Image (cartoon, rainbow, N blue to C red):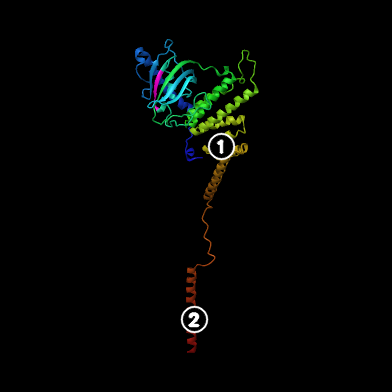
Amino acid sequence: MSEAERTLVDKSESSSFEDLASAAAQEIEEAKLAEVAAAEKDRPAETKTEEWQDVLGSGSLLKKSLKQGDESTGLRPHRSDICRISYEVKIRDSGEIVEKRDQVKIYLGDNEILQGLDLALTLMYKGEECLLQIAPRFAYGDIGLKPGESLGLVGEVDSPKYSGPAIDSDTWLEARLELHDWTEEPEHETLPIAERMETGIRRRARGNWWYGRGEPQLAVQLYRRALDVLDESEGGITDPTPSGDIAPSSDALKALLEERMRVHNNMAAAQLKAGAYDAALQAVTRVLSCQPSNAKALYRKSRILSAMGRNSEALEAARAAAAAAPDDAGARKELQRCEQKATRDRSVERRLAKRMLGTDQPKPASPDKKPSRAKMLVWGSLLLSLLVGVASVLVYRYKMQEH
């Protein structure tokens, strides 16, 4: 585990803390948009197409109508509505085209398009066309976009790569956006399995794109939305028919289950990256309850438990992951890391135990097997002095006897 991972704070007091944070941010944005919408409604019609509208009041998202929409009903799309739109995004200063889409279907509020486009759609009427100036914060953010990176186009798992000049953290974009029409999102239980699979996969793919850009919380939102449409309904998922008696094939259910497991796995990785350890553990637990030998889930469980400081459980999960996928280099590396961590922990525990028991006192130095040269000189001098003394006594006694 990297130093950065070790210092992450567990923010997951509830399993959906990131949803609460994003919901609060969404409420703020929606409140601002509601104010702007009310002000715009009161303005004379002739001025609506002639001036830039500061959507959020901060100058970071400007909107100018090019063609008026149908305002007769006063209705605008809301979050989760399915909008059919066309748009072209350019770099504002150079005019280079970043991406262009015609008649594409998006779920409003799902972060399937740039946030600036998403916000502007909530202020548009059916048939309206507008021009937008979008600050980096509501475009490609601090990360930007480099040539060769994925555009993450909605509805495309293998999205095309960006081929224009680099978009930096201070690059403004300009977009032409048209709202053709919209419909409410249908109840998931009424959708055929094939359509549910398609929607779930597109949301997972977009979530993967956000995760790859270092935006785990946005990725989690997409993964949760994918699970909404992939979850089983009461009595099991069925392909709707007029009579309701045709059950789906086992292959369809198996494919749906596999897709759900992929989404749960990916969501666990994003939650781990965001520091939501409890929520991440819940996600892999759901996978392992259905697929106990899922190597990817076991690997991520080990990483999550390590981040939580539950090292012995992490080692157990790492061993299970390595057993489930013996040829997987990542699983082997994780097991090695956990084993090294366990060895270090045991060493620390032994040292602490010795200190507590007072058995860690240093041992006395053992005597030298051979006396050093200095010691030999000292002993030699003492012996010589002794011999001289004895000789003096003997000489004195001998002289006394002669007298």
Of the residues shown, which amino acid type is indicated by label 1?
Ser
The crowding category of the residue bearing disc 1, from other C-alpha atoms within 10 Å (few below 14, some 14 to 19, many at least 20), is many
77 in the magenta segment: no
Of discs 1 and 2, which sits in the foreground? 1
Q: Quadrant of residue 53?
A: top left
Relative vertical location of residue 193 with respect to residue 393 in this rendering, above or below: above
Provide the secondary structure element on which disc 2 rests: helix
The crowding category of the residue bearing disc 2, from other C-alpha atoms within 10 Å (few below 14, some 14 to 19, many at least 20), is few
Q: Which residue is mark 1?
A: 302
Residue 34 placed where, x, y %? 40, 18
Question: Residue 286 or 33: which is nearer the viewer?
Answer: 33
Q: Quadrant of residue 52?
A: top left
Residue 391 placed where, x, y %? 49, 81
Which SS does the magenta portion mostly show?
strand
Residue 185 placed where, x, y %? 51, 17
Of the residues shown, which amino acid type is indicated by label 2?
Ala
CA distance separating discs 1 and 2 = 84 Å
Question: Residue 356 or 9: which is nearer the viewer?
Answer: 9
Q: Is residue 296 visible to us here? A: yes
Question: Which residue occupies 56% across, 19% down?
Answer: 188
Question: Residue 83 or 288: which is nearer the viewer?
Answer: 83
Provide the secondary structure element on which disc 1 rests: helix
Relative vertical location of residue 372 with respect to residue 202 in this rendering, above or below: below
Query: What span is colored magenta in the figure?
Result: 130-135
**How many numbered discs, if any?**
2
Name the residue furthest top. 72
Residue 243 placed where, x, y %? 63, 13
Q: Which residue is mark 2?
A: 391
Question: Residue 261 or 169: which is nearer the viewer?
Answer: 169
Q: Is residue 17 visible to us here? A: no
132 in the magenta segment: yes
Q: In the drawing, what numbered circle is on residue 17?
A: none
